[in-house]
Image (cartoon, rainbow, N blue to C red):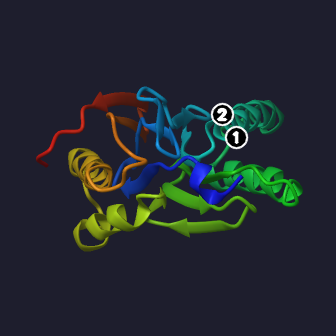
Amino acid sequence: MTAMYMPGATAVGITYNDGVVFASERRIAYGNFLVSKTTKKTFVITDKVGATCAGLVADMQILSLQVAALAKIRKMEIKRDVPPNTVAKMMSNMMYERRFFPLLTQVIVGGLVDKPTIYTLDPLGSVLPDEYAAVGTGAEMALGVLDPQYKKQMNEEEAINLAVKAVRSASLRDSASGDGIDVLIINKNGVKEISEKILATS
């Protein structure tokens, strides 16, 4: 197997004044074959923490399920909401333990307990905090939109529009990304999910 058979994707995460926004496209492609147009790559981990991933879908799904279960146990132990940095560290530990047979996924995880935060994790479990991030084969194109347009203290509508614009821009040029956008918003009121089509104009 060569790198050409690794599935691509585009996923972004953005912090704003009241929470975090995750956005990802829905396409799964192996080489020249389009496997799925409806695959969800945004995941709710807890009421206050979510994630979005790029890479092998099976690895994304098992990682999110296992971490969600661990976060539930941790919440019962500490009797309060599990903060995003704890969830990121749980993911990091799982990924590092499997470093010789790694989970083939890049992750953006984040949420809101004290303040909005996101972290980027590579397949070996490195934890990199940031205000916004992009992963996957379309990351460079998405960051080309995020870098000049992101600003601190954006409101929710601005953050959603920017996340969607970044994923849409990548999807229009990255053949491994496309077929719709899923958006996950986490703020003090809880979790909200919306979906959008990818149109030729932004």
Reading the image, the residue beneath label 1 is 59
Secondary element at tag 2: helix
Instruction: Using the rendered view, name the quadrant where residue 69 is placed.
Output: top right
Residue 70 drawn above or below residue 165? above
Residue 103 in view (yes/no): yes
Instruction: Using the rendered view, name the quadrant where residue 68 is placed.
Output: top right
Residue 64, horizontal then vertical, whole percent:
67, 37
Q: Is residue 91 left or right of residue 53?
A: right
Image marks 1 and 2: residues in contact by CB distance under 8 Å: yes
Between 71 and 10, the one nearer to me in the picture: 10
Residue 113 in view (yes/no): no
Between 146 and 57, the one nearer to me in the picture: 57
Q: Is residue 102 left or right of residue 120?
A: right
Q: Amino acid at mark 2?
A: Gln
Secondary element at tag 1: helix
Residue 95 drawn above or below residue 196? below
Q: Residue at x 39, y 29 (%)?
A: 192
Residue 38 image label: none
Residue 26 drawn above or below residue 126? above
Between 193 and 114, the one nearer to me in the picture: 193
Residue 47, horizontal then vertical, whole percent:
56, 31
Reading the image, the residue beneath label 2 is 61
Q: Amino acid at mark 1?
A: Asp
Between 73 and 114, the one nearer to me in the picture: 73
Q: Residue at x 34, y 41 (%)?
A: 178
Residue 109, horizontal then vertical, whole percent:
57, 50
